[in-house]
Structures are given as C-alpha cells and as structure tokens.
C-alpha cells in the first residue's frame, strides 16, 4: 500500500528542537550546556556551567520561579547576551525536568526570534493548505499512491480519506480519464520538473450530472539530499472560467463568420454552424416566409398562424436527422399558447425549457406529433427558443437543442444564444434588405434590357445576362440589337462602372442615348463621340446639383453627399458595331471595351484588330472606327469584361480562354449552345461581376435580292426608272407594290434631281420589307412639312410617309441617302 509514514495531512508540526539547550537547577545555576547553545551565544560549556543563568540575559534574567512565564506552548520572548556583548533576540521555552536525583530542574530551549517566525509561517501555511485553501491538493509517493489530501479536495471530489489514502488516482476516480494525469505524475517523479495547468474534463460523485473542467498542476517534493520522493498534485476547478472562455470564443467566432455574404440562407447557415456543437447539439433557424422575398417583417407580436420557412439547420449527427423540415420547407411550429415558440414570438424574449419529470415529451407538443416523436426518439431534453429580431422587427426564431450532452442549458447559455442571434439577426436583416434591393434592381435592369431580340434578317442573335453573385449587387452591363436602315443592324454591348440601383438606372439612360443616336444612322465612331459628350454633360450637371445639395444638407452634418446617379456613368465602356448584310462589312468602334471576337467559317477564332478609345466620360481623345469584311455565317461575339476577367487570372488569360472555347467547342453549335458553352467554360457558379454576352451569326443578302441603278441628275430618267422598278418588282413577285413603289421612287428621285447634285443612285432591297433608297451628294436633309393649298411642292415626303411604314435619312462620307420601307404584304392602310 505504499509508504504510510506520513499518511494524512500534517495539521500540527511538532515543536522545533532548539539549537540552544541548557539545564538549570532549582537555584538558577547552569548544570548543562549544549553545542547549539554554544553556537547561539558563543560560550563554551566550561565557561558557563556553574554560573547563574541570569548572567546570560541582557538585563538580568529570571530565576527558576520566573520560568513559569515561558512554559506555554508558544514559549515567550527573551533577550540574551552574546559572549561578545551584543543582544540576541530569542523565543524561550521552559519545561520542568527531573533528571533522577530527586531535585527539580528546568530544561530551557532558545531559538532565534526570526527562526521561530519562519517556523510559524511554515506551520500556518501548511495548516492553510490543508484546511482553508480553495485549491484542492494531494501528495503522492514514488508509487503514485496518495499520502494525504486537503479539505478542498475532499469537498471537490466527495472522496474521503479512507477511500483515497494508499490508492492511485485511477483506483479512486471512476468518471474522469486519469491516464494522462498519472503519466504526468510519473514524469514529474522521474524528471523532477513541474507540469502546470493541464485541463481535464469529467464528472465527480458530488455533481454527477454536470461536466466540469479542472486545471491540474504537479510539482516535485524533494528531501534534504535533493532527491524527489513525492509529488504534490494541485487541482483547481475552472469550469466557470472555461465556460466563459468558450462563450467568448463563440462570440468571436460569430463576429468573424456570420455575415460573410449577403445571401439570406448562407447567413442563417453560418449562425447554425457557429452554435453547433459548441453551444447546442442541434440548431435550426426558421424565418417568416415573407422575409425570403425581402419584404418587411412584422414589428409587433407574431401571430401563431404566421408561416415559417426553414432557412438553415445543423446537427452533431451528419444529415441532421432531428430536423422536422428541410431547408426552404415550411415548418409548422407548435401552436399551443404555452409552447416556447408561441411565448418567444408573443413576448419577443427568449425562452429556456428543459424536460421535467418522467415524461420526456412536454404537453404543448400534443398537437405536433412529428416533433414530439423526434424529441422522444433523439432524447432531446433541453431547448432554447430565441426570437430573431433586428431593428425592432421579428424575422423568425432560432431553436437550440441538447440531446447528447446531459447537462441542460443554463441561464448563461441563454445569454450567449441571445448575443449571437442578435448579431446574426442584423446580418440576416441586411441580407433581407439586400434581397429586396437586388430584386428591385434586377427587375429594373431586366426591364431596361431587351425583353427579346428584334426580328431582322442581317444576323441571327442570342444573348445571355448573368447578374453578379457577390454582395456588390447587380451591375450596369447591357446589350442591344438595333435594326437600322438598309437592312443593316447595330450590335451594342456596354458596361457601367459600379453596382446596384444607381448603376442599373445609369445603364438605362446610356442605352436610351445609344438607341436615340442609332436612329440617326451615325457611324460608330461619331455615335460614341456623341455618347461621350452626353455622359460628360450629365456628370457635370449632376455634380453641380450634388454640390448645391451638399452645401444645404450634408456639409452641415459633416457628411459627404452621396454621388449623383449619372456620376456612375463616368468610366463606362461600350462597343458599337454595325453590320451591313449587302456589303458584308462590319464597322465598329470601342470606348474602353474588350475587342469583339470573330469565328469565320473554316477559320479560327480571333479578335478583330482595332483601336480602343477611352472610356465614356473621359473626353479629350477621338474614337476610331474599324471596318472588316465578314464571310457569310461568320460568328461575332461581343461581351463585357466580367466574362474574361476574374480574381484568379488577368484579362489576357481570360481572353485566351475565350478564343480556345470558341475554337474547340463552338464552331458547329447553335447560337444558344454557343452561349451556354461559353458561360459554362468561363464563368464560375457565382460570377463576381455582371456578365453580358451577345453572339450573332451573320446572314448576307444574296445579290438577287438587291437591285441598283446609277443615274444622271436629269428629269428624263424618272420615267425610265419607273419602268425598271416595275420589271424588278415583277421578278421578285411583288407586283402588288408596283404602284406605291413607283410613287415613292418618283418623289425621291425628283427631290434629288431638283435639290442635289449628281451622281444619283437608286437601290431596291428585298428584305423583310421592301427598301427603296436614293443617294446623292447633297448634305441638305429633307423635312416633312404640310404644304399650303397654293404651294407647288412640299407634298412628296408627305406621300412617302403615308405609303411607307418608316422612312429616314442617313449620311456616309460626303453622300446622303433617303430611304423608305414598305411591308411586303402591301402599303399600310
């Protein structure tokens, strides 16, 4: 059973054996003198034996009757005189003693006062460690068997001396893993080096239902030779400190993890992931159904009839088998008035509840058999229901359950749950607001984008638009397909700097400006120059308005005014391309935009070499147009930088990937398949920036669908041309349009002959409509006006407007073209 010499705590040490001992007879004469006395006072035995003991006191010491004052257990103070004359302060003990000769003697013991003080401190320290110390302590011998334990350890463990002394730790404690501690004791015994603050979890008989945490320290005890003969094992209950530290860690984790995105479901899942397993064994977050759509949540009490939808859940068991609803499914909470859900929602405060009694299923679950069965099956014994509230409104509830951990939730756990849910609620509400704003911006943006691409014969076109998947919100990317005169078509892709509602609004304004200028049939470089002027004018105007507003409001409050909407247009990019199916020419200009890609039949994908102008709004530099001829059925790809630029690689690498994709996978695909392939190969699941993609396949008009005549500026040609027009329309099987077309041709040629200079060209184009064009070298534009009753002219354009579905004027170089379109099924009625 190990060493039993010192078994039990030494509450009272024996009185110290004095270094100075002497014997005094009944007359007060010294009869004995020890070596310790010689060391203390400097006198040898032959010098003092036979002399009165009083001579050794500084002021004449007491005789035998006076020794009574020094017989108490603690002795009494005495000032002795050293042989060299200096005083020696001591504590003196006196005991009657009979040496056997029948005469009374006194045994005197003296110890220096400071040595006694040290002994008193040591005794008090040992008594304090044994009886009053809050630190549980025990001593183990070289065989790791307990020699003694103090009162704190008895209170902590509930194990008495008779159960612990002479036994190892593993023989005494059953509900704590002691293997590591015993290894630590053995290591300290062998190495003589203390080991401090090793945490151990477990339960003790005095509190079997609650897991506790202890800090263990072991340090060596050495004998006078310096050899380790035992170890002292100190145990401090740090359960509350440990739990406080865990709660702080959970709060720090919640602050770092929750709200990393503005996605509602992801934010709710972050809350559940933080809570499990450190706070709960299962957690679920159910939000009011309308919150998922971004709508405003109720501000008062939430009715029991409210529909809740599961936003997230997490469990210590893979697959969350405790869940009664899947994510995004409706969860029907117990509607009983006394249920914790109803109480939490009605009061807006958290509810903590645990199973009481033998029945594990509370009464309020009588109308919720599925949840009641889950509680019974999984052994759920404690739960917290915390309202998810932010900015005075209730968004839903967070539910935390325990089943594996036997200790129920406590008030401190509820405070922790309140704190992390409150932090998460703000992030969830931000995600809700973002969902609403994003939905509004997306709706606005989609309403500003083409709902469908217009029907026209020059190209077959398809598009894709992908909004950004990040917290930046929707951007200002746009695309457009604009039918132009002469069977031509304009293809536009643009990108506004920034994200959100302002970028969407600015995108709409720029798209409108481009469409308006496109109706004027301006060349691409001139059109971008006009858009650039418009952007700079809008920015300047809005900057001036913003400055005035800031002077009146924001400056007074010390806040910088919000940028005006049109300031977002500054730095927008755009590519504007015009394709002519008759000449098969593509003419385009760029304003800070990536180059278009072209895949010709039988050729490889390549970017069209072209000059890139400055972004819109910069000003000061011209835009240059580039013209290339494209074979029929060429593939033209326009896009925004979100397609080719990413955090993982620069734009050059993205452009190379685009060309490889077009070469490898898209040559013989339909346009829809081309769009899908490009998007899947180049875009991650959630693109960091908006992406606009416009893909068009050219469709050239054959020569037999176009007829042209070069004419002199002579009135006589009009009648001849009328006949030529009639024959051409007959070949096209458009005889029903001969009369109206002859009127249009006559009026256009007559105007050109009268008001312009030669040469004159007449061109008829059979497309989706019949196009009649007259070109001349005059820069004067005709205007539709109402002719007076006596006027000889002014009725020609009026007739053309009545007989055509649309007409207009365009300029190219030094020539002007007036055109008119008629539907193939006859003039409009």
Image (tube, rainbow, N blue to C red):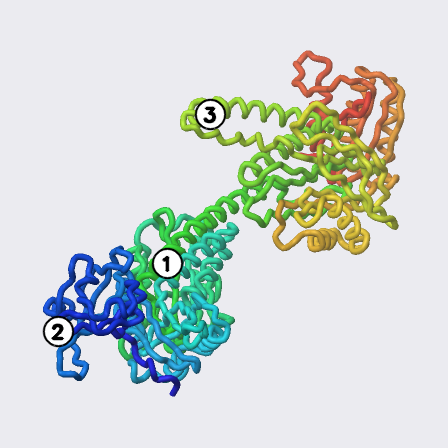
58, above or below 132, in the image? above
Compare residues 684 and 331 and report the one nearer the observer: 684
Residue 482 picture location, percent across and down: 70, 37
Compare residues 7 and 290 and report the one nearer the observer: 7
Q: Which residue is mark 1?
A: 416
The residue sitting at 66% across, 27% down in the picture is: 618
Q: Is residue 826 visible?
A: no
* C-alpha span from label 2 to label 1: 79 Å
Q: Which residue is mark 3?
A: 550
Residue 228 picture location, percent across and down: 44, 74
Classify residue 115 by image quadrant.
Answer: bottom left
Q: Earlier in the sequence, mark 2 or mark 3?
A: 2
Compare residues 539 and 576 and report the one nearer the observer: 539
Residue 3 picture location, percent across and down: 38, 84
Q: Is residue 158 left or right of residue 468?
A: left
The residue sitting at 61% across, 23% down in the picture is: 537
Mark 1 touches mark 3? (CB < 8 Å): no
- Picture quarter with the N terminus: bottom left
The residue sitting at 19% across, 67% down in the picture is: 51
Q: Is residue 609 visible?
A: yes
Question: Mark 1 falls on what kind of element?
Answer: helix
* C-alpha span from label 1 to label 3: 43 Å
Q: Nearer the viewer, mark 2 or mark 3?
A: 2
Q: Nearer the viewer, mark 1 or mark 3?
A: 1
Within-10-Å neighbours for mark 2: few <14, some 14–19, many 20+: few
- Picture quarter with the C terminus: top right
* C-alpha span from label 2 to label 3: 110 Å
Image disc number at residue 26? 2
Q: Earlier in the sequence, mark 2 or mark 1?
A: 2
Q: Is residue 283 left or right of residue 574?
A: left
């Amino acid at each position: 059973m190990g060493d039993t010499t010192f078994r039990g705590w030494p509450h009272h040490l024996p009185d110290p054996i004095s270094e100075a001992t002497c014997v005094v007879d009944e007359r007060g004469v010294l009869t004995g003198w020890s070596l310790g006395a010689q060391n203390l006072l400097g006198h040898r035995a032959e010098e003092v034996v036979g002399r009165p003991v009083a001579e050794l006191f500084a002021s004449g010491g007491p005789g035998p009757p006076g020794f009574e004052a020094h017989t108490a257990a603690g002795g009494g103070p005495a000032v002795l005189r050293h042989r060299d004359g200096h005083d020696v302060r001591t504590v003196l003990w006196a005991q009657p003693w009979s040496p056997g000769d029948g005469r009374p003697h006194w045994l005197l013991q003296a110890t220096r006062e400071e040595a006694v003080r040290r002994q008193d401190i040591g005794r008090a320290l040992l008594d304090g460690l044994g009886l009053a110390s809050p630190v549980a302590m025990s001593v183990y011998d070289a065989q790791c068997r307990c020699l003694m334990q103090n009162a704190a350890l008895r209170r902590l463990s509930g194990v008495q001396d008779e159960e612990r002394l002479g036994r190892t730790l593993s023989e005494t404690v059953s509900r704590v893993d002691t293997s590591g501690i015993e290894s630590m004791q053995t290591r300290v015994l062998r190495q003589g080096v203390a080991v401090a603050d090793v945490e151990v979890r477990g339960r003790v008989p005095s509190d079997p239902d609650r897991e506790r945490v202890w800090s263990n320290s072991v340090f060596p005890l050495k004998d006078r030779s310096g050899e380790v003969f035992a170890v002292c094992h100190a145990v401090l209950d740090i359960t509350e400190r440990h739990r406080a530290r865990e709660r702080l860690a959970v709060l720090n984790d919640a602050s770092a993890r929750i709200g990393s995105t503005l996605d509602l479901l992801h934010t709710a899942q972050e809350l559940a992931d933080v809570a499990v397993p450190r706070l709960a064994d299962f957690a679920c977050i159910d939000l009011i159904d309308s919150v998922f759509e971004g709508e405003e949540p109720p501000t008062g009490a939430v009715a029991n009839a409210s529909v809740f939808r599961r936003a997230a859940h997490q469990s210590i068991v893979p697959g969350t088998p405790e869940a009664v609803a899947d994510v995004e499914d409706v969860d029907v909470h117990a509607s009983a008035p006394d249920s914790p859900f109803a109480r939490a929602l009605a009061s807006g405060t958290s509810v903590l509840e645990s199973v009481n009694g033998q029945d594990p299923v509370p009464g309020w679950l009588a109308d919720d058999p599925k949840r009641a069965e889950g509680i019974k099956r999984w052994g759920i014994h404690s739960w917290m229901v915390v309202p998810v509230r932010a900015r005075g409104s209730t968004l839903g509830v967070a539910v935390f359950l325990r089943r594996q951990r036997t200790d129920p939730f406590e008030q401190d756990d509820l405070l922790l749950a309140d704190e992390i849910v409150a932090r998460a609620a703000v992030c969830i509400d931000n995600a809700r607001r973002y969902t609403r704003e994003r939905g509004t911006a997306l709706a606005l943006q989609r309403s500003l984008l083409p709902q469908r691409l217009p029907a026209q014969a020059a190209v077959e076109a398809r598009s894709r638009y992908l909004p950004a998947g990040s917290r930046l919100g929707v951007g200002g990317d746009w695309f457009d397909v604009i039918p132009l005169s002469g069977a031509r078509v304009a293809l536009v892709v643009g990108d506004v700097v920034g994200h959100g509602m302002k970028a969407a609004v600015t995108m709409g304004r720029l798209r409108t400006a481009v469409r308006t200028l496109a109706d004027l049939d301006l060349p691409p470089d001139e059109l971008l120059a006009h858009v650039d002027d418009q952007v700079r004018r809008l920015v300047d105007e809005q900057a001036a308005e913003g400055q005035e507003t800031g002077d009146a409001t924001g400056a007074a409050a010390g806040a910088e005014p919000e940028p005006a909407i049109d300031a977002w247009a500054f730095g927008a990019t755009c590519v504007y391309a015009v394709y002519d199916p008759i000449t098969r020419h593509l003419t385009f200009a760029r304003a800070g935009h990536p180059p278009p890609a072209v895949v010709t039949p039988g050729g490889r994908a390549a970017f069209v070499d072209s000059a890139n102008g400055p972004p819109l709004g910069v000003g000061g530099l011209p835009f240059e147009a580039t013209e290339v001829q494209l074979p029929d059925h060429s593939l033209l790809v326009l896009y925004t930088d979100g397609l080719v630029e990413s955090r993982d690689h620069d734009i050059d690498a993205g452009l190379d990937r685009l060309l490889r994709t077009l070469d490898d996978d898209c040559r013989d695909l339909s346009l829809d398949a081309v769009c899908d392939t490009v998007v899947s190969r180049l875009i991650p699941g959630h693109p960091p920036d908006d992406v606009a993609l416009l893909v068009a396949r050219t469709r050239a008009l054959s020569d037999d669908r176009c007829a042209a005549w070069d004419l002199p500026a002579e009135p006589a040609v009009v009648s001849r041309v009328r006949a030529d027009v009639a024959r051409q329309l007959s070949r096209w099987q458009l005889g029903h349009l001969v009369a109206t077309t002859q009127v249009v041709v006559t009026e256009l040629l007559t105007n050109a002959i009268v008001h312009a200079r030669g040469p004159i060209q007449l061109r008829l184009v059979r497309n989706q409509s019949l196009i009649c064009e007259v070109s001349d070298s005059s820069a004067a534009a005709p205007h539709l006006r109402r002719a007076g009753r006596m006027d000889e002219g002014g009725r020609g354009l009026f007739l053309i407007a009545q007989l055509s579905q649309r007409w207009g004027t365009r300029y190219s170089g030094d020539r002007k073209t007036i055109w008119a379109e008629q539907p193939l099924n006859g003039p409009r009625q």
